[in-house]
Amino acid sequence: MLSTDTQETTAFSPRPAVSEVFARTVDAPVGTVQAAAARIDVIGSLVDGLIALGVDDHVVAPCPNGLVWRFDRSEYRRVRIAWSLQVEAETDDATLVSLAVRFSGSDDAASDRLLEAWPVLGPIVELHARRVLHAVETLAEEGEEDPFESAAPKLRVVSSGR
Protein backbone atom coordinates (compact mmCIF):
# COMPACT_ATOMS: atom_id res chain seq x y z
CA MET A 1 0.00 0.00 0.00
CA LEU A 2 1.35 3.42 -0.90
CA SER A 3 1.73 5.84 1.94
CA THR A 4 0.44 9.28 1.11
CA ASP A 5 1.79 11.27 3.99
CA THR A 6 0.07 14.60 3.44
CA GLN A 7 1.93 16.05 6.42
CA GLU A 8 5.19 15.84 4.45
CA THR A 9 7.16 18.94 5.43
CA THR A 10 10.68 17.56 5.20
CA ALA A 11 13.16 19.99 3.68
CA PHE A 12 15.60 18.37 1.29
CA SER A 13 19.14 19.44 0.53
CA PRO A 14 19.31 21.53 -2.64
CA ARG A 15 22.57 19.72 -3.44
CA PRO A 16 21.89 16.10 -4.44
CA ALA A 17 23.67 13.26 -2.66
CA VAL A 18 23.65 11.33 -5.96
CA SER A 19 23.09 12.60 -9.47
CA GLU A 20 23.16 10.52 -12.67
CA VAL A 21 22.42 11.38 -16.30
CA PHE A 22 21.60 8.83 -18.98
CA ALA A 23 21.32 9.77 -22.66
CA ARG A 24 20.47 8.32 -26.04
CA THR A 25 20.47 9.74 -29.56
CA VAL A 26 17.22 9.06 -31.40
CA ASP A 27 17.09 9.11 -35.19
CA ALA A 28 14.06 11.37 -35.49
CA PRO A 29 13.39 15.13 -35.59
CA VAL A 30 13.10 16.94 -32.28
CA GLY A 31 9.33 17.53 -32.61
CA THR A 32 8.64 13.82 -33.07
CA VAL A 33 10.84 12.92 -30.08
CA GLN A 34 9.22 15.61 -27.90
CA ALA A 35 5.79 14.16 -28.71
CA ALA A 36 7.06 10.66 -27.86
CA ALA A 37 8.64 11.83 -24.58
CA ALA A 38 5.39 13.56 -23.57
CA ARG A 39 3.65 10.17 -23.76
CA ILE A 40 5.98 8.53 -21.20
CA ASP A 41 5.00 8.26 -17.55
CA VAL A 42 8.47 7.98 -15.97
CA ILE A 43 7.30 7.82 -12.35
CA GLY A 44 4.22 5.61 -12.69
CA SER A 45 6.20 2.64 -13.97
CA LEU A 46 8.79 3.12 -11.21
CA VAL A 47 6.09 3.16 -8.52
CA ASP A 48 4.46 0.09 -10.13
CA GLY A 49 7.80 -1.72 -9.87
CA LEU A 50 8.19 -0.76 -6.20
CA ILE A 51 4.69 -2.04 -5.50
CA ALA A 52 5.53 -5.31 -7.27
CA LEU A 53 8.63 -5.66 -5.08
CA GLY A 54 6.50 -5.16 -1.97
CA VAL A 55 8.33 -2.04 -0.79
CA ASP A 56 5.56 0.42 -1.56
CA ASP A 57 5.16 1.24 2.15
CA HIS A 58 8.47 3.12 1.84
CA VAL A 59 7.02 5.48 -0.78
CA VAL A 60 5.79 8.51 1.17
CA ALA A 61 4.41 10.49 -1.73
CA PRO A 62 4.64 10.16 -5.50
CA CYS A 63 5.22 13.54 -7.16
CA PRO A 64 4.89 14.63 -10.81
CA ASN A 65 8.65 14.31 -11.37
CA GLY A 66 9.64 11.84 -8.66
CA LEU A 67 8.85 10.52 -5.24
CA VAL A 68 9.77 10.77 -1.57
CA TRP A 69 11.18 7.60 -0.01
CA ARG A 70 11.56 6.77 3.67
CA PHE A 71 13.89 4.09 4.95
CA ASP A 72 11.47 2.61 7.48
CA ARG A 73 8.04 3.35 8.94
CA SER A 74 9.21 5.02 12.14
CA GLU A 75 11.97 7.07 10.59
CA TYR A 76 11.65 10.64 9.37
CA ARG A 77 14.86 10.48 7.37
CA ARG A 78 13.80 10.63 3.77
CA VAL A 79 15.18 10.86 0.28
CA ARG A 80 13.64 12.87 -2.56
CA ILE A 81 14.08 11.24 -5.97
CA ALA A 82 13.56 13.56 -8.95
CA TRP A 83 13.62 12.55 -12.62
CA SER A 84 14.01 15.04 -15.45
CA LEU A 85 13.59 14.16 -19.14
CA GLN A 86 15.13 16.58 -21.66
CA VAL A 87 14.94 16.57 -25.44
CA GLU A 88 17.22 18.67 -27.66
CA ALA A 89 18.01 18.66 -31.35
CA GLU A 90 21.44 17.44 -32.46
CA THR A 91 20.72 17.73 -36.19
CA ASP A 92 17.58 18.00 -38.33
CA ASP A 93 17.09 14.23 -38.12
CA ALA A 94 18.70 13.32 -34.79
CA THR A 95 17.68 14.24 -31.25
CA LEU A 96 19.44 13.79 -27.92
CA VAL A 97 17.21 12.51 -25.11
CA SER A 98 18.62 12.86 -21.59
CA LEU A 99 17.17 11.48 -18.38
CA ALA A 100 18.64 12.92 -15.19
CA VAL A 101 17.93 11.51 -11.75
CA ARG A 102 18.79 13.31 -8.52
CA PHE A 103 18.59 11.95 -4.98
CA SER A 104 18.57 14.47 -2.12
CA GLY A 105 18.48 13.51 1.54
CA SER A 106 16.47 15.22 4.25
CA ASP A 107 19.67 15.34 6.33
CA ASP A 108 23.24 14.04 6.31
CA ALA A 109 22.22 10.70 7.85
CA ALA A 110 19.66 10.11 5.07
CA SER A 111 22.24 11.01 2.42
CA ASP A 112 24.76 8.66 4.04
CA ARG A 113 22.22 5.85 4.10
CA LEU A 114 21.44 6.46 0.44
CA LEU A 115 25.14 6.25 -0.45
CA GLU A 116 25.44 2.97 1.49
CA ALA A 117 22.52 1.57 -0.53
CA TRP A 118 23.77 2.90 -3.89
CA PRO A 119 25.57 -0.33 -4.94
CA VAL A 120 22.12 -1.98 -4.98
CA LEU A 121 20.05 1.05 -6.07
CA GLY A 122 22.39 2.30 -8.80
CA PRO A 123 21.86 -0.64 -11.20
CA ILE A 124 18.08 -0.45 -10.65
CA VAL A 125 18.09 3.28 -11.46
CA GLU A 126 20.21 2.66 -14.56
CA LEU A 127 17.92 -0.13 -15.78
CA HIS A 128 14.82 2.02 -15.31
CA ALA A 129 16.47 4.97 -17.11
CA ARG A 130 17.52 2.80 -20.06
CA ARG A 131 13.99 1.37 -20.33
CA VAL A 132 12.53 4.89 -20.39
CA LEU A 133 15.01 6.04 -23.06
CA HIS A 134 14.27 2.95 -25.14
CA ALA A 135 10.53 3.60 -24.84
CA VAL A 136 11.01 7.20 -26.04
CA GLU A 137 13.05 5.96 -28.99
CA THR A 138 10.46 3.31 -29.90
CA LEU A 139 7.56 5.77 -29.70
CA ALA A 140 9.50 8.33 -31.76
CA GLU A 141 10.19 5.75 -34.46
CA GLU A 142 6.49 4.82 -34.50
CA GLY A 143 5.63 8.54 -34.70
CA GLU A 144 7.92 8.91 -37.71
CA GLU A 145 6.08 6.06 -39.41
CA ASP A 146 2.63 7.37 -38.46
CA PRO A 147 2.58 11.05 -37.40
CA PHE A 148 -0.99 10.68 -36.13
CA GLU A 149 0.28 8.30 -33.42
CA SER A 150 1.74 11.27 -31.49
CA ALA A 151 -1.79 12.31 -30.53
CA ALA A 152 -2.30 9.09 -28.52
CA PRO A 153 -2.52 9.22 -24.70
CA LYS A 154 0.45 8.79 -22.36
CA LEU A 155 1.86 5.30 -22.01
CA ARG A 156 3.43 3.66 -19.01
CA VAL A 157 6.72 1.87 -19.45
CA VAL A 158 5.90 -1.71 -18.53
CA SER A 159 8.21 -4.64 -18.01
CA SER A 160 8.37 -7.18 -20.77
CA GLY A 161 9.35 -9.80 -18.22
CA ARG A 162 12.96 -9.91 -19.44
Image (cartoon, grey):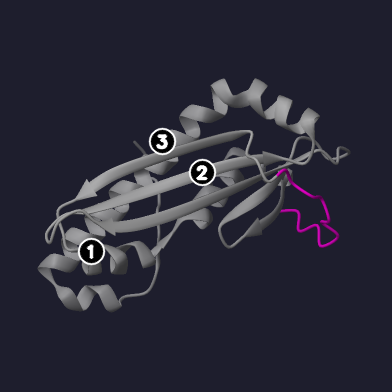
State the residue position of label 1: 30
Whole-angstrom CA distance, mark 1 to mark 3, is 24 Å
Q: Which residues are magenta?
A: 1-13
In the image: residue 85, left or right of residue 104: left
Sequence-first disc among 3 and 2:
2
Residue 158, image x and y in percent? 40, 51
Q: Is residue 70 left or right of residue 150?
A: right
Query: Does the stretch in magenta take in 5?
Result: yes
Looking at marks 1 and 3 on the same chain, the residue that comes earlier in the sequence is marked by: 1
Task: Give SS at disc 2.
Answer: strand
Q: Position of residue 157 (x, y in %)?
A: 40, 54
Mark 1 or mark 2: which comes first in sequence?
1
| Label 2 environment density (alpha carbons within 10 Å; few <14, some 14–19, many ≥20) | many
Q: Nearer the viewer, mark 1 or mark 3?
A: 1
The residue that disc 2 covers is: 101
Q: Is residue 121 above or below residue 37?
A: above
Is residue 85 or residue 61 the one in the foreground? 85
Q: Quadrant of residue 147?
A: bottom left
Q: Secondary structure at mark 1?
A: helix
Question: Does the image show residue 67?
Answer: yes
Q: Is residue 6 magenta?
A: yes
Residue denoted by label 3: 127
In front of the other: label 3 or label 2? 2
Badge 1 amino acid: Val
